[in-house]
Image (cartoon, coloured by chain):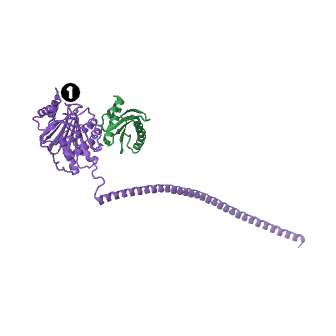
Chain colours: A purple, B green
């Protein structure tokens, strides 16, 4: 083989080798390139996935944070509510505890001593039931129930009722003072000069003392209705009528001082009361008995303090009833007795005291006697036709 | 009738009370009966702060406007009644006077003054 041939062969071989190499290299490059691309794509996918995961995580974290904050906030609010509730419960416990202690005290008192805390405390409802039996009747303008301090106890109070209630203290005091000598005062009526009448009845069964007061602008409130109200109060309070008072009766005879003018007055009084069933009739000037007579009437030592009390009552009643003067006071006692003090003229110190047993004097009968006596003497007790000053003894008494 | 005559009417001849007076919200005495100057001044100094306190207490306790109040002491007693939201009628009682009588007098005086003002 020639060198040229060798050279050709070598050249062909070289070319073949080079082309093979080139082809192989190119194929390997493409493969590499594809592999690299896949890797890149995978990495990209991984990155995207990672990004997606991180975004989800962030949202989750944010949500979780929010939830956590909500939970924390909720817990705080719950805590505040719980604290409030706890405070309320503590206060409630304290209140219940105090109430339980109080109840235990009450129970102890009731169970231990069998003495209730307020044994005779009048309840407005009870009193309302009593006063409603009188309220609204004919000849009844105002009704009130008051205790011995003069405070109205029932609920239907007005200004007139307040004034009536304010009468009770003096009436209650007078009744209490007179009880040892006269016995229990059943009813007490006060007549004003303008024809108003206030009648007071003691309601039984309350230690504090409760009185039913009824006022009329024309005549005494109906006795039957007042009796029924008091009887109802007795039933309500389970209080029964006490034993009658032992009446101290005098044998009879003249009352007052003796003297020429008192004789004149005594004769006039006798004539004025003739035909009337009067056990005692006395003419008084202030607290002093001028003259009088009695047949099984009141003893003088009972009559004199009674007249004093009546004058005290007159003075207060005039103010309480807003009247110019008090015309008459009538007290109904047990045994059917009625003691009355009738003023002889507005503002006069002269008065007629009468005691009846059984049938009381009719108002017109009283007015007739009072009118006759008033015409017979002046406001100082001097008989008409008499002259000069009122004769008095050394002690200043009327003679 | 004048204010003086109402105050006089409630105080004169009343065996249960010492005197009565009508006082403005600023403590000025409008009318007085039966009370010396010193006693009137002392009564005003005592009653007006009490009235303010009672007004507040009555309002906070849901009692509404104060109408009347009575104070009983061992030596003396008095009642005060509202006339028109500003003026106060004061009635001083004698020792042993019943609170009901004081209350009735104070309310009567306040009523009369109110009606007198309305007329």
Q: Residue at x 27, y 51 (%)?
A: A120
Residue A342: x percent and y percent?
19, 35
Q: Chain of mark 1?
A: A
Residue A358: x percent and y percent?
12, 42
Residue A164: x percent and y percent?
27, 39
Q: Looking at this view, is B119 or A73 the one in front?
A: B119
Instruction: Name the outermost residue toward the bottom.
Output: A1
Neighbour tally class for label 1: few under 14, some 14-19, many 20 plus, Cα within 10 Å: few
Quadrant, the C terminus of chain A: top left
Residue A85: x percent and y percent?
45, 56
Q: Looking at this view, is A306 or B46 the one in front?
A: A306
Q: Residue at x 76, y 67 (%)?
A: A24
Q: Which residue is the site of mark 1?
A: A388
Residue A42 visible in image:
yes
Q: Looking at this view, is A106 or A169 the one in front?
A: A169
Say what secondary structure mark 1 lies in: loop
Asked whether, in this view, residue A249 is left or right of residue A176, the answer is left
Q: Is residue A78 above or below residue B84?
A: below
Residue B107 falls in image quadrant: top left
Q: Looking at this view, is A296 or A185 the one in front?
A: A296
Residue B37 falls in image quadrant: top left
Asked whether, in this view, residue A293 is left or right of residue A162, the answer is left
Residue A95 falls in image quadrant: bottom left
Q: Is residue A38 above or below residue A132?
A: below
Instruction: Name the outermost residue toward the left.
Output: A275
Residue B71 visible in image:
no
Q: Is residue B105 above or below residue A383?
A: below
């Amino acid at each position: 083989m020639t060198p040229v041939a060798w050279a050709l062969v070598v050249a062909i071989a070289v070319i073949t080798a080079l082309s093979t190499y080139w082809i192989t290299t190119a194929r390997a490059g493409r493969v590499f390139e594809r592999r690299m691309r896949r890797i890149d794509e995978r990495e990209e996918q991984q990155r995207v996935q990672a990004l997606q995961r991180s975004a989800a995580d962030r949202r989750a974290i944010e949500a979780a944070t929010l939830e956590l904050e909500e939970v924390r906030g909720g817990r705080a609010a719950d805590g505040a509510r719980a604290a409030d509730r706890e405070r309320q419960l503590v206060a409630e416990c304290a209140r219940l505890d105090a109430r339980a202690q109080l109840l235990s005290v009450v129970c102890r008192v009731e169970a231990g001593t069998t003495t209730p805390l307020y044994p005779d405390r009048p309840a407005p409802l009870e009193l309302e039931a009593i006063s409603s039996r009188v309220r609204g009747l004919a000849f009844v303008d105002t009704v009130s129930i008051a205790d011995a301090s003069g405070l109205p106890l029932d609920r239907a109070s007005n200004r007139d009722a307040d004034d009536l209630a304010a009468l009770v203290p003096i009436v209650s005091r007078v009744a209490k003072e007179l009880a040892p000598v006269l016995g229990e005062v059943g009813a007490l009526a006060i007549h004003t000069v303008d024809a108003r009448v206030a009648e007071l009845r003691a309601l039984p069964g309350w230690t504090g003392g409760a009185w039913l007061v009824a006022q009329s602008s024309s005549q005494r409130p109906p006795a039957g209705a007042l009796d029924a109200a008091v009887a109802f109060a007795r039933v309500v309070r389970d209080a029964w009528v006490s034993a009658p008072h032992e009446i101290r009766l005098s044998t009879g005879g003249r009352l007052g001082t003796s003297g020429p003018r008192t004789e004149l007055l005594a004769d006039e009084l006798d004539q004025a009361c003739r035909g009337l069933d009067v056990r005692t009739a006395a003419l008084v000037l202030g607290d002093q008995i001028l003259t009088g007579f009695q047949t099984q009437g009141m003893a003088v030592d009972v009559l004199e303090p009674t007249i004093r009390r009546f004058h005290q009552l007159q003075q207060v009643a005039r103010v309480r009833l807003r009247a110019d003067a008090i015309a008459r006071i009538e007290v109904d006692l047990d045994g059917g007795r009625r003691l009355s003090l009738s003023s002889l003229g507005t503002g006069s110190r002269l008065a007629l005291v009468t005691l009846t047993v059984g049938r009381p004097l009719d108002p017109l009968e009283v007015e007739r006697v009072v009118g006759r006596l008033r015409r017979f003497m002046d406001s100082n007790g001097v008989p008409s036709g008499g002259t000069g000053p009122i004769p008095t003894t050394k002690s200043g008494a009327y003679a | 009738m004048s204010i003086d005559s109402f105050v006089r009417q409630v105080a004169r001849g009343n065996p249960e009370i010492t005197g009565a007076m009508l006082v403005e919200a600023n403590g000025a005495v409008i009318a007085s009966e039966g009370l010396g100057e010193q006693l009137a001044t002392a009564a005003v100094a005592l009653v007006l702060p009490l009235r303010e306190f009672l007004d507040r207490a009555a309002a906070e306790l849901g009692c509404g406007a104060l109408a009347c109040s009575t104070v009983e002491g061992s030596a003396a007693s008095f009642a005060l009644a509202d006339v028109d939201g500003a003026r106060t009628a004061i009635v001083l009682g004698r020792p042993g006077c019943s609170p009901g009588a004081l209350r009735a007098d104070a309310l009567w005086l306040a009523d009369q003054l109110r009606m007198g003002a309305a007329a």
